[in-house]
Image: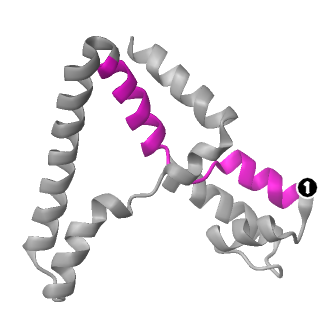
Amino acid sequence: MTILALLIGLLISHYATGVRHCRQFNILLAPSQWVHARNPEPSWAVMAVLIVTCVLAAVVAKWLMTGLAGTLGWFLLAVFVFIYCLGPRDLDKDVQELVDNGLTPQAAETMEAMQLSPESTADEAAAAVYHASLSRW
C-alpha cells in the first residue's frame, strides 16, 4: 500500500504541474512567525510552537480523514502528504527550462531559485544543480 501511495504521488506530481503551487508552507509557519514577531530574539518558544503546530495539524488531518473515509482516507492522506512534502519545484523541469529557453521569465525565475545569474559559468551552473538536488532530496 505504501509503494502504491508513493507511485501515485510521483505520477500526480510529475503530470499535474499545477500541484506545485499548492505546496506552500506559510500556513504551518504562521503561528511560529507570530511568536517570533512578539519575541524576536532566538528562543525555544518559536521551535516549540512550530512542533506543536505540525503535530496538531497531523493529528487533526488523520482524525478527519480516517473518520470520514476509514482506510481509504488514510491512503488519500498519505498521498497528499507525500505530494505536499516533495517541495515547490521540480529539478528536472527547472534544468530543462534553463537549457531550452534561455532568458524567458520562467527561466529567470528558475535562475533566481537556483541562485544563478546570466553571467554564471557552466561550472557554477553544475554546482547549483548539484546543490539544488541535494537540498530537494
Give SS at disc 1.
helix
Q: Does the magenta stretch include residue 88?
A: yes
Name the residue nearer the viewer: 33 or 126. 33
Look at the magenta stretch and give its main secondary structure. Answer: helix
Three-letter amino acid code of the residue under disc 1: Asp
Left or right relative to 132: residue 104:
right
The residue indicated by pointer 1 is 100
Q: Quadrant of the rendered structure where residue 59 is?
A: top left
**As drawn, 64 above or below 17:** above
Q: What are the residue bounds of the magenta stretch? A: 73-99
Q: Position of residue 121 (x, y in %)?
A: 81, 74
Crowd band around label 1 with a 10 angstrom C-alpha radius: few (<14), some (14–19), many (20+): few
Left or right relative to 29: residue 114:
right
**As drawn, 101 above or below 91:** below
| Residue appearing at x 59%, y 30% in the figure | 12
Q: Where is residue 97 in the image (x, y as percent from the top left)?
A: 81, 56
**As drawn, 16 above or below 50:** above
Q: Where is residue 79 in the image (x, y as percent from the top left)?
A: 43, 28
